[in-house]
């Protein structure tokens, strides 16, 4: 039986329980103000400031509805300049890695998600943080490429960051490296490592609060050797290695919300429920491909003078 955590900050709540900015608890709003410099009375002004910065970039066609912009403001503690840089990086990554973000939809990644390698757990931790699981050691490179694996992980993050609870409380990740072998590591080039680190540190509007690595073999030291020079000191301090000792993992994440693979009480890991929810967002991901830098989206037929009537109820995008 799952313990009752602080539900006022989303702790222990069902990951599918729907929240929006108008339904946030007083305690959660206080946490947002304390940790993120967010004040409800200033929110409209702050969103408009970021929207104006987007309008001043003639090459960028961005979503500019309130819900979308809030995730960038929250990820950078309502610093306009840093929030705008993050938003630019978010879209620029799609230019630099156009092959990865082409056909970036749940249906295009169904063959990866059905392998049950990644997804968010059904419940949040006591701090209200969403828990992402990636079982990289079970990946079979003959079934999907490293790029498709990356795409499948990112689209899960895209789905989860819609939730204000996740925007405010953040994300923790459990990386299961059980059965990791040389046939995996040879696909993990420095360029691929840079892509992963760039997403986490500079190009995605989420607060990554902790990374827990479990069941890592000695070979994993080689992966860390590739990655560590790319990681900021702040992120390095948030990486924990546990080996096969799940009790140390439980000191961070209670066993009653973890699957049995991690010594938990919720049964075997399954991404089925989360992926079914993700599939319901197919049209949203299709619409999202109409945004980006002009050079990137020109081939999709989106013109700077076109008004895109999407993402209601706001129905406004900054297109010049």
Image (tube, rainbow, N blue to C red):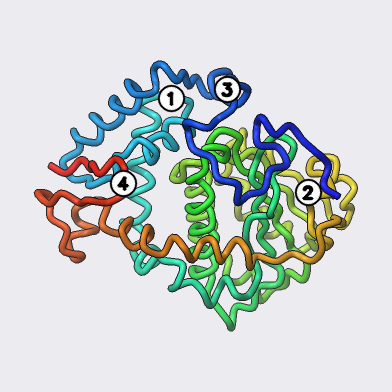
Q: Which mark is residue 78?
A: 1
> Front-most of 150 and 315?
315
Which secondary structure, mark 4?
Answer: loop
* Mark 3 surroundings within 10 Å by alpha-carbon count, few (fewer than 14), some (14 through 19), many (20 or more): few
Residue hosting label 4: 312
Give the x, y percent position of residue 103: 36, 69
Residue 34's x, y, as percent?
58, 18
* Label drawn at residue 35: 3
Closest to the camera, between mark 3 and mark 2, is 3
Judge the density around disc 4: few (<14), some (14-19), many (≥20) Cα neighbours within 10 Å. Answer: few
Query: Percent x, y for residue 23?
Result: 52, 32
Give whichever of discs 4 and 2 has the lower sequence position: 2
Q: Which residue is mark 2?
A: 241
Q: Earlier in the sequence, mark 3 or mark 4?
A: 3
Say if mark 4 contacts mark 1, CB within 8 Å. Answer: no
Mark 2 and mark 1 residues within 8 Å of each other at the beta carbon: no
Residue at horizontal 65 percent and vertical 31 percent from the top: 9
Determine contact: label 4, label 2, CB under 8 Å.
no
Which quadrant holds residue 186? bottom right
**Mark 4 to mark 2: distance in Å?**
43 Å
Q: Secondary structure at mark 2?
A: strand
Image depth: mark 2 or mark 1 in front: 1
Q: Is residue 249 visible?
A: no
Q: CA distance from mark 4 to mark 1?
A: 24 Å
């Amino acid at each position: 039986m799952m313990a009752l955590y602080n539900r006022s900050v989303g702790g222990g709540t069902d990951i599918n329980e729907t929240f929006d900015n108008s339904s946030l608890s007083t305690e959660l709003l206080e946490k947002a103000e304390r940790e993120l410099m967010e004040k409800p009375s200033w929110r409209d002004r702050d969103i408009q400031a970021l929207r104006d910065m987007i309008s001043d970039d003639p090459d960028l066609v961005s979503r500019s509805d309130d819900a979308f912009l809030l995730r960038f403001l929250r990820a950078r503690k309502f610093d306009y300049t840093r929030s705008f840089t993050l938003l630019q990086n978010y879209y620029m990554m799609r230019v630099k890695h156009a092959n990865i973000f082409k056909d970036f939809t749940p249906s295009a990644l169904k063959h990866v998600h059905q392998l049950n390698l990644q997804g968010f757990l059904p419940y949040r931790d006591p701090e209200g943080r969403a828990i992402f699981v990636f079982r990289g050691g079970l990946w079979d490179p003959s079934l999907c490429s490293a790029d498709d694996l990356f795409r499948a992980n990112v689209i899960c993050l895209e789905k989860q960051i819609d939730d204000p609870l996740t925007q405010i409380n953040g994300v923790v990740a459990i990386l299961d490296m059980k059965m990791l072998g040389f046939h995996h590591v040879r696909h993990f080039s420095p360029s691929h490592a840079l892509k992963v680190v760039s997403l986490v540190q500079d190009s995605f509007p989420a607060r990554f609060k902790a990374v827990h690595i479990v069941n890592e073999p000695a070979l994993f030291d080689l992966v860390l050797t590739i990655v560590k020079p790319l990681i900021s000191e702040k992120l390095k301090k948030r990486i924990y290695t546990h080996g096969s000792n799940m009790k140390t993992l439980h000191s961070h994440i209670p066993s009653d919300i973890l699957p049995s693979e991690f010594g938990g009480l919720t049964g075997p890991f399954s991404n089925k429920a989360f992926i079914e929810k993700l599939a319901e967002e197919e049209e949203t991901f299709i619409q999202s491909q109409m945004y980006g830098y002009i050079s990137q989206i020109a081939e999709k037929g989106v013109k700077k003078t076109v008004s895109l009537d999407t993402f209601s109820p706001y129905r406004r995008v900054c297109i010049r």
